[in-house]
Amino acid sequence: MQFTGPEGRARLFDGMRRSCKRGGLVCIHGYTPKQLEFGTGGPPFAENMYTESQIRADFAGWDTLECRTYEREVQEGRGHSGMSALIDFVARKPT
């Protein structure tokens, strides 16, 4: 999903919101724009990455269980290796 720009992401998230059953969870793990400073993988465009405010807005009305940004070392192969700027988002669809 991170190689999809904002317009494509809006379509993907719309599909996720529609297909998730009531009370179901959406879990997203991705990069924040700070990742560009590290250059250790991910898309080359900040607009393809996630911020806390943007992803909360994308799932407005849902119960956000976790939304946090953090940095950590990742070793996921040649294309994703080194310090990374990450975000985890978990939200429950309203019942």
Image (tube, rainbow, N blue to C red):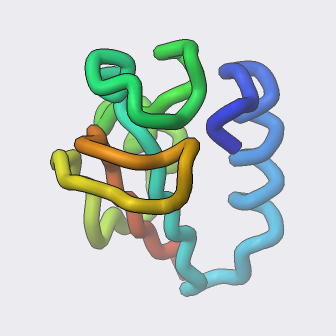
When asked about the image quadrant of residue 89, the answer is bottom left
Can you say which quadrant of the picture contains the N terminus? top right
Task: Depth check: give the residue in front, 25 or 35.
Answer: 35
Question: How many numbered markers are drawn?
Answer: 0
**Residue 13 screen position, x and y as percent:** 70, 47
| Most distant residue in the front direction | 78
Q: In the image, what residue occupies the spot 81% across and 69% down?
A: 19
Q: Using residue 27 as the reference point, say whether residue 54 is left or right of it.
A: left
x, y percent for residue 16: 74, 60
Is 30 located above or below residue 45 in the figure? below
Which one is nearer the viewer's eye here, 30 or 40?
Answer: 40
* 8 with respect to 25 (left or right): right
Q: Which image quadrant is residue 82 in?
A: top left
| Residue ID at (40%, 34%) | 40
x and y percentages locating residue 44 in the rendered image? 56, 17
Image position of 7 (left or right of 85): right
